[in-house]
Amino acid sequence: MSLLQVILPVIIMLIIGIICREKKLIRPEGIEGLQALVMNFTLPISLFYTFYRASIKADTVIFPVTFFVVTAGGIFAGRLLCKLVKEKDVYFPFTLTGYEAGMLGYALFGILLGNDKITQFALMDIGHVLAIFTVYVAMVKSAGGSRQTAGEAIKGILSTPVLIGIMSGVILSVTGIGGLIESSSAGPVIGGVCEFVAAPTSAVILVVIGYRMHFVDIAWKKISKVIVLRLVQQVLTAVVVFSLFHALGGIFSEQLTLISAVIMMILPPPFVLPLYIEETEKKEFYSSAISVYTMLSIVGFMLLSAAALH
């Protein structure tokens, strides 16, 4: 596969999304519908199909544990960085940790390496999602003066279709049921259906992201601060994660694992962050900051693709 084969689909689908917004070909409600389609059906089914056929070993629990710690611990590391640069905005540290895997990471990974190889990346995302719906959201709400109950946290986890898809596939895999299904006459039928449903996932995600990219009335000075501090924190995170994986060896030092971790760490902050911010001005600022960082993430993905395909 050439580099152009990887990056051109990304660029084209983003441009299509931008055109759809500028020409008003799709209303905002329609984009919400496309996102709901992906997050509730096509992506969970794709991940379910990947995992129920995968060989899950006990030691791979290190992937979700690592990224739970990275995401939750990143909040406190972010607060420390903010103190060092005298940044007092209570929401600022939340831009320095967390990763938008659902609405971007899976699409980019699938384009570069194919969804059939996404196991390590998705295992990392399990830990990340658990941290988001427990520690991250609770602390964002606390920063805004409200609180998240344990019931709300559990509901958030149990009602996340992507996580349900992954865990259902993992259960079938570790119990051996997935292997029995795959080797039966039903295997090719289920596989064909899952692949057909999952096929448009990456394209639709990128159209949605392109549609939502807004670069007007941007506070460039403060956004530059977000970018620099996040890059610093993610470089430090990468050093810790790669050192751990190198020490563990085996599957943790494989190229596929390392690429999965890099894709995760170049992603922008979670798109849900502005949803938990009450102040309109701050909500708009953090939405803009995430849009700008999303473009940088895509540039980073292109550089990673060039290196991986070299």
Image (spheres, rainbow, N blue to C red):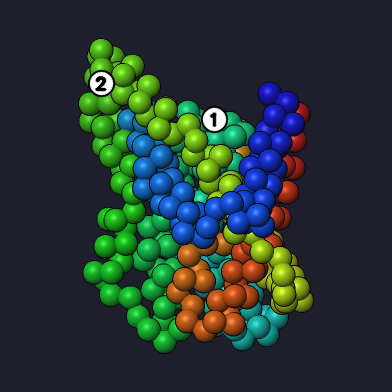
Q: Is residue 301 toward the left or the right of residue 146 in the image?
A: right
Is 194 placed above or below 11 here? Answer: above
Mark 2 is surrounded, within 10 Å at the Cα level, by few (under 14), some (14 to 19) or many (20 or more) other residues, namely: some
Give percent across and percent down for residue 55: 37, 28
Identify residue type, mark 2.
Ile
Q: Residue at x 36, y 42 (%)?
A: 41
- Badge 1 amino acid: Gly
Q: Quadrant of residue 305?
A: top right
| Closer-to-camera residue (247/112) | 112
- For residue 48, which quarter of the picture? top left
Vertical arrangement, residue 97 with respect to residue 143, above or below: above
Can you see residue 224? yes
Q: Give the residue at x 67% y 51%.
A: 19
* Residue receiving disc 2: 181
Q: In this view, does 59 lie above or below 187?
A: below
> Which residue is label 1 attached to?
114
Place of residue 269 in the rendered image (x, y in percent of width and height, measured from the top left): 57, 62
- Picture quarter containing residue 178? top left
Q: Where is residue 183 in the image (x, y as percent from the top left)?
A: 28, 14
Residue at screen point 59% across, 34% down: 111
* SS label for mark 2: helix
In the displayed structure image, the side of residue 159 where residue 129 appears, left or right = right
In the drawing, does residue 10 fall left or right of residue 224?
A: left
Q: Residue at x 69, y 47 (%)?
A: 15
Q: Which of 15 and 118 is in front in this view?
A: 15
